[in-house]
Amino acid sequence: MSFLSMTRNIAENLFKGPSTRRYPKEKREYGLKSRGMIGIDIEACIFCGLCSRRCPTGALTVRKDQKEWEIDRLRCVFCGYCVEVCPKKCLAMANHYSPCVTERAAAVHLERQALRDAADAPAEGKE
Amino acid sequence: MSQRNVIPFGPQHPVLPEPIHLDLVTEDETVIEAIPSIGFVHRGLEKLVEKKDYQDFVYVAERICGICSFMHGMTYCQAVEEIMEIAVPERALYLRTVWAELSRIHSHLMWLGLAADAFGFESLFMNCWRLREGILDIIEATTGGRVIFGSCKIGGVRRDIDDETMKGIVEKLGTIGAEIGRTTDVFLNDYSVQHRLKGIGVLSGEEAHALGTVGPVLRASGVAMDARKIDYAAYRNLKFEPVVEKAGDCHARCRVRVREIFQSVDLIGQAARKMPGGEIFVKVTGAPNGEFFSRVEQPRGEVIYYVKANGTKNLQRFRVRTPTFANLPAMVKMLEGASIADVPNIILTIDPCISCVER
Ligand code: SF4
Ligand code: SF4
């Protein structure tokens, strides 16, 4: 049994700075592999809908006829399943959070593919 | 005879950010009886299994608990793999072991901090959580998440740890381990800590066994039972003995967890040395048909998963018996006869995780 078992710790703390980060002055560096915001290269998407069918929280909506891909960022739990299943590998995860919002609707992010020539549209839509 | 009073404890209580309610029947300062009630955060995850594809359900299983998340996913995967008779690659089994042990370290460090907080040793609490941050950094660097790993899948794991990184992890654990040692010495030797924990909430070996306790609570009462000994994942190839203490009081449970941290550091070192090369997953097709009980040793004790499938993409029945659920009867028993001031300590030494009790 001992008293003063934290003495070494106290002495160290006198000379060491704080262990916590001086946020917001000092920002946290995220690791390269950190799972974060989902992004899409909409031009490569074929609107197969696999990502939205697999998403465990139902955060994704794919509208094939409108060529739209939509994500509700507040529902996304950063699991990365959509990135894993996408056949065209057009989804990617950034290593940081999605931006803050002040109302729910603002977290819904829509991407629409630019309309192409009528000629290649059917070919693109093939599953 | 003095008057009996009922003191409500929880579901909101400063010492325990977990929603459990206890009616403490007291006489003067002594607890005569503790009547628990749970069910404040029931989420119905077991029912959800009928709606989700069995492969997607890994993500739901991981979210049963925010602390042993990886082990929940792993137990679920093991159950389905057994039913489908999938041979998981060796490397995946080793990686699962490494991540499981990392979760154990961070969970025990978190618990040590909370325990220090419960007996009023704030700087010790902060020290433990500072050290835990180092472990969480390793976890984030290898899986991408701090507490939800998202790395287990049916048939293997989703991510690999390359040999260079693995070496770095073992080295880093060496340095963090030395620091952890200095902090845990306070738990083991400090006079005030012992004063608060020694001889409090004593549970004998027979009682612990009869009440069906699991994990550190059972081992602190002298029963050497550790589900890792049933040889799942890579544990069959690693050398370790269950950590056992005899006293059965709060301090013994604390010592078990302290020693388990170093055991986990050692296990990760062994796994890193023996890690074979090769694939990290096998492709899984078809649907499971059959049933299986899967058991895994979580930081809080043994978890049991029952999975029943009928050959479709959705499972038929899914049932989880979490370690805290098994330890609640022992907690009620230990509270009888305790003094009011010791109630927070006793409750904390079973390491309660009520959110996973309720699933
Ligand atoms: S899975 Fe990929 S290609 Fe298919 S709809 Fe989603 S983002 Fe587009
Ligand atoms: S990361 Fe997971 S939760 Fe988020 S959109 Fe993709 S599948 Fe859905």
Image (cartoon, rainbow, N blue to C red):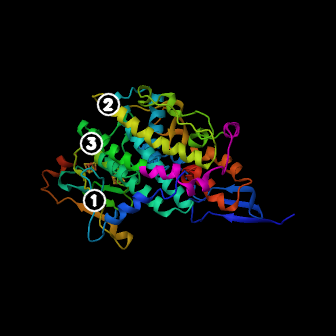
Q: Is residue B204 above or below residue B131?
A: above
Q: Residues within 10 Å of mark 2 (few under 14, many from 20)?
A: few
| Mark closest to the chain's N terminus, 2 or 3 | 3
Q: How far apart are marks 2 and 3 (CA)?
A: 12 Å
Disc 2: which residue: B273
Q: What element carries label 3?
A: helix
Residue B301 on image: x %, y %? 55, 41
Q: Distance between the residues labelled 1 and 3?
A: 24 Å
Which residue is nearer to you in this view: B295 or B103?
B103
Q: In this view, does B324 lie above or below A72?
A: above
Q: What element carries label 2?
A: helix
Report the predominant secondary structure element of the magenta stretch.
helix
Residue A114 on image: x %, y %? 17, 60
- Callout 1–callout 3 Cβ contact below 8 Å: no
Task: Judge depth for marks 2 and 1 and give the one in front.
Answer: 2
Disc 1: which residue: A96
Residue A121 on image: x %, y %? 17, 52
Q: Which mark is residue B168?
A: 3
Q: Mark 1 lies on which chain?
A: A
Q: In this view, does B88 lie to the left or right of B111?
A: left
Q: Does the magenta stretch include residue B62?
A: no
Span colored in magenta: B182-211
Q: Are marks 2 and 1 on the same chain?
A: no
Q: In this view, does B166 lie above or below B12?
A: above
